[in-house]
Image (spheres, helix red, strand yellow):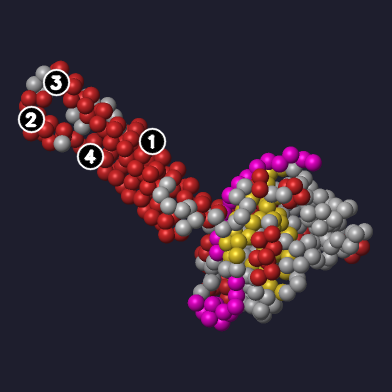
């Protein structure tokens, strides 16, 4: 309304320096109020409803997008209509846009992370936060054969699969290069392409890692150098004195075929295994599943096809195509992974 009055009576408003200064102050105050109201409206829209409701999440994201467009339009109008000498509104508009982007980023994280019961590393049990070989049966049920490397950076990754959520503690000190490679794939949304659990053998392991998009497979196929193995090697060290097997259920490592052969294919142990990690350089663990629900998910992954699942060549060419789904209807998939927390944990 003020703009209409100014346009109609601009010959009067510009008639004196006093009225001009008044106009500039009114315009500046009005613009600031409009931006403030807009940000408040965005926050209000984004807090309506239940965070766990997927439809509500979509509405909130849509509101944030609309607000972004409104801010851009307000910025353009301000540039076109503001009188000479009026202060630049870019700073306040930039602040508002940043607020919208923060809201969108928060929603993106919540959309992916809500499936996992662990929301941060603080949720880990003590035996998960500080893994050790135990002489007495404790919460980890004598899970580790030897004391794993401790301390250092730990990334908590929440993955969705077709059979449930899976939380992975990626322990950089266990295998720095392997951990970094996996996290690079996570950050690139590699697993959102729908990665098939292509070779899952009951009571043994599950192999996966070829992307649902062949272009993504090609992008991350490059091999990395080996990390030093911290597990005891050789046939004499398949178990320890308590019968704990070398490569327990839920350990993550890479599939490979020789020295420095770790690429984009991974393995996770479905059961405690005495043979894995005993000398093959690619089988150095870089992380493990944590939380009861993650072990429940491991139990649910289909082992229908065993070694007879879709071939690597087929998946590399077609990805997770309709043809693959038609010929292997019982196949399960990893559908997304996101880093939900990261922390440097003290050595113990």
Magenta-highlighted residues: 322-348
- 266 vs 155: above or below: below
Q: Is residue 185 visible?
A: no
Please say if the residues under marks 4 and 2 sit with CB atoms less than 8 Å apart.
no
* CA neighbours of label 1 inside 10 A, class few (<14), some (14 to 19), many (20+): few
Quarter holding the N terminus is top left
Question: Of all residues shown, which one is farthest toward the bottom?
Answer: 327
Disc 1 from disc 2: Cα separation? 33 Å
Q: Magenta includes 102?
A: no
Q: Is residue 232 visible?
A: yes
Quarter holding the C terminus is top right
- Name the image quarter holding residue 73: top left
Question: What residue sits right under mark 1 in the picture?
Answer: 95
Near-viewer residue (40 or 241): 40
Question: What residue sits right under mark 3 in the picture?
Answer: 19
Near-viewer residue (205 or 6): 6
- Name the image quarter holding residue 271: bottom right
Disc number at residue 9?
A: 2
Q: Earlier in the sequence, mark 2 or mark 3?
A: 2
Q: Magenta includes 326?
A: yes
Q: Position of residue 63 (x, y in %)?
A: 36, 50
Disc number at residue 77?
A: 4
Q: Secondary structure at mark 4?
A: helix
Q: Earlier in the sequence, mark 3 or mark 1?
A: 3
Q: Earlier in the sequence, mark 1 or mark 2?
A: 2
Please say if the residues under marks 3 and 1 sit with CB atoms less than 8 Å apart.
no
């Amino acid at each position: 309304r003020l703009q209409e009055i100014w346009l109609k009576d601009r010959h009067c408003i510009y008639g004196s320096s006093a009225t001009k200064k008044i106009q500039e102050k009114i315009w500046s105050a009005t613009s600031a109020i409009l931006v403030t109201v807009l940000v408040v409206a965005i926050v209000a829209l984004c807090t309506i409803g239940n965070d766990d409701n997927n439809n509500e999440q979509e509405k909130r994201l849509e509101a944030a997008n609309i607000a972004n467009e409104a801010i851009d339009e307000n910025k353009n109008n301000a540039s076109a209509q503001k009188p000479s000498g009026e202060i630049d509104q870019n700073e306040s508009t930039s602040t508002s846009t940043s607020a919208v982007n923060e809201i969108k980023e928060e929603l993106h994280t919540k959309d992916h992370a809500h499936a996992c019961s662990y929301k941060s590393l603080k949720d880990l049990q003590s035996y998960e936060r500080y893994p050790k070989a135990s002489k007495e049966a404790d919460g980890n049920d004598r899970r580790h054969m030897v004391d794993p490397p401790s301390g250092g950076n730990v990334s908590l990754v929440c993955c969705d699969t077709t059979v449930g959520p899976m939380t992975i503690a990626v322990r950089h000190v266990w295998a720095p290069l392997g951990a970094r490679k996996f996290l690079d794939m996570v950050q690139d949304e590699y697993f959102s392409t729908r990665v098939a659990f292509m070779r899952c053998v009951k009571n043994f392991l599950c192999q996966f890692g070829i992307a649902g998009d062949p272009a993504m497979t090609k992008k991350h196929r490059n091999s990395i150098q080996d990390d030093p193995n911290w597990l005891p090697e050789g046939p004499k060290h398949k178990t320890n004195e308590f019968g704990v097997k070398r490569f327990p259920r839920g350990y993550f490592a890479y599939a490979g075929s020789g020295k420095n052969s770790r690429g984009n294919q991974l393995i996770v142990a479905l059961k405690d295994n005495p043979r894995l990690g005993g000398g093959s350089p690619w089988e150095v663990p870089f992380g493990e599943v944590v939380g009861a629900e993650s072990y429940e998910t491991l139990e649910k992954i289909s082992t229908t096809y065993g070694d007879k699942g879709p071939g690597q060549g087929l998946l590399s060419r077609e990805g997770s195509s309709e043809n693959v789904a038609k010929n292997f209807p019982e196949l399960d998939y990893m559908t997304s992974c996101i880093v939900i927390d990261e922390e440097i944990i003290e050595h113990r």
